[in-house]
Amino acid sequence: MKRSVLTRYRIMAYVTGVLLVALTLGMIGKYVLDLGGAADFTQVVSIAHGWLYVVYLIFAFDLGSKAKWPVKKQLWVLLAGTVPTAAFFVERSITRELEAEAAVEDPAVAKA
C-alpha cells in the first residue's frame, strides 16, 4: 500500500475532527449559551463538515479496501468522523497499526 493513501486519510481525519469539534462548540454557543453569531458560524461549519466528511469517507474507504480490513473495522473507521474527537484517536490507532505492518513487510520503511 502506498504511503500517500495513509497520508490523505490522516489529513482528512484531522480536518473532519477539527470541524466536528468546531461544530459542537458552535452548537453549544447557539443553543446553550445563546450567542449571537453562533447561528451563522454553525451554519458555515456544518456545511463544510458535511462536504468534507464525504471526502473523508472516500479516503477512509479507499484506505480500508487497500489494507483489506474486515467490514466491522471499516465501519468503525468510517463512523469516527461523526463523534467529536473520535477521528483523532482512531487516526492515531490506524496509523500506528499500518506503520507497524509496513515495517514488518519492508524493514527499510521503519528507518524512514
Image (spheres, rainbow, N blue to C red):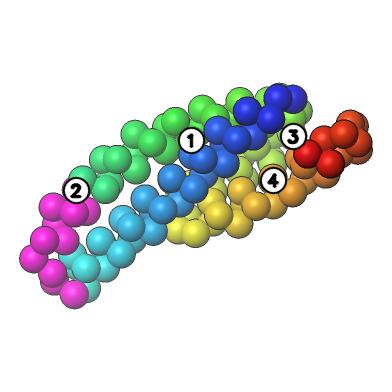
The amino acid marked with disc number 3 is Pro
**Numbered label tally:** 4
Q: Which secondary structure lies at badge 3? A: loop
Q: Quadrant of residue 95?
A: top right
* First of labels 1, 3 by sequence position: 1
> In the image, is 103 to the left or to the right of 64?
right
Residue at image point 65% right, 52% down: 92
Residue at image point 74% right, 34% down: 70
Q: Which residues are magenta?
A: 33-43
Mark 1 surroundings within 10 Å by alpha-carbon count, few (fewer than 14), some (14 through 19), many (20 or more): many
Residue 83 on image: x %, y %: 47, 55
> Which mark is drawn over residue 70?
3
Mark 3 surroundings within 10 Å by alpha-carbon count, few (fewer than 14), some (14 through 19), many (20 or more): few
The amino acid marked with disc number 2 is Gln
Label 3 and label 2: CA atoms lie apart by 36 Å
Quadrant occupied by the C terminus: top right
Residue 56 on image: x %, y %: 48, 35
Q: Which residue is mark 2?
A: 43
* First of labels 3, 2 by sequence position: 2
